[in-house]
Amino acid sequence: MPALYHAHSTPLRHWSTLLVLLCLSPAAPAVTLNMMFGHADGEPIVEFESKAPNAPLSGGVTYDLGRALALQLKVQLQFVEFSRRRVEMALLNGDAHIACNTNPAWMDKPERYHWSKPVYAHAETLVSRQQVGKPIREPQDLKGGSLGTILGYRYPDLEPFFQQGSILRRDEPSLDGNFRKLGSGQLTALISTRDEIAAWLRRRPTEQGKFVVSDKDLTTYPTHCLLSPKAPITLEQLDAALDALRKSGQLQQIMSRYQLSPVP
């Protein structure tokens, strides 16, 4: 029978849950895989049904990739939301089993987890306001200025500038908050991935003329799927499922939908 997807949200103590039951036969799979997401990820990594705080996922890379992986692995998939500050605790204690928009450089102790092969590539860049004068293309152009960043995120290449105080880090929970501050002149620039910047501007065409996206990439890095040591599947099973999605062309279809490039 065709796959059936049933979704509902259940508020828990610190996080909300979107349960997607993937049934390949009348009997549902016994194993449940908890896939992590966060509102701070932004589009196109996550897309929600509405702007309500507990709105369920309705699309995005995490949603589409998670469902495709669950079909390959023949498991139930449950999306669980955590703030950035609770990511590592949730993964270590098994409240979350997998996250697929991450990189070892962003974790305090990446060796505590199991890492898949690279899945897709990201490029980070700077956004500034339209202004007369030297464009902001790299960290050296920001000296003495303030940079909009995401609360709890790591920026390894920028840490020396933050520690020296030559660039002031200004955290916000989301990219939307950073764009609002940048537009009102409270920030010199913001940093984000090109895909998230493009998605934000695409949904707000009247805002596009207010900002300048640098033509220079600050960092380019692969993203991986991370498995908790308490995950109900093995790294070998995860990599095999990702390989199957590559060979079938499904991974390319998902990434193309969101203007991303899968890593071969």
Image (cartoon, rainbow, N blue to C red):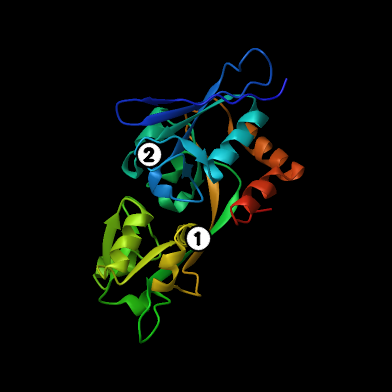
Callout 2: helix, strand or loop? helix
- Relative horizontal placement of residue 146, taking residue 121 as reference (left or right): left
Q: Is residue 107 visible?
A: no
* Farthest residue, direction front: 206
Callout 1: helix, strand or loop? helix
Q: Residue 7: image x %, image y %? A: 51, 26
Q: What type is the residue that disc 2 sits on? A: Glu
Q: Is residue 2 visible?
A: yes
Q: Crowding at label 1, few (<14), some or many (≥20) Cα neighbours within 10 Å?
A: few
Provide the residue designation for mark 2: 88
Q: Crowding at label 2, few (<14), some or many (≥20) Cα neighbours within 10 Å?
A: some
| In the depicted structure, whether residue 9 falls above or below residue 62 | above
Q: Residue 129: image x %, image y %? A: 36, 74
**Cα separation between marks 1 and 2:** 32 Å
Q: Residue 159: image x %, image y %? A: 33, 63
Q: What type is the residue that disc 1 sits on? A: Arg
Q: Residue at x 26, y 71 (%)?
A: 185
Can you say which quadrant of the picture contains the N terminus?
top right
Q: Nearer the viewer, mark 1 or mark 2?
A: 1
Q: Residue at x 39, y 64 (%)?
A: 191
| In the depicted structure, whether residue 176 falls above or below residue 241 | below
- Camera-side residue: 7 or 152? 7
- Relative horizontal placement of residue 167, taking residue 217 as reference (left or right): left
- Camera-side residue: 174 or 245? 174
Q: Residue 152: image x %, image y %? A: 32, 50
Dot 1 and dot 2 residues touching (CB under 8 Å):
no
Residue 202, numbered label: 1
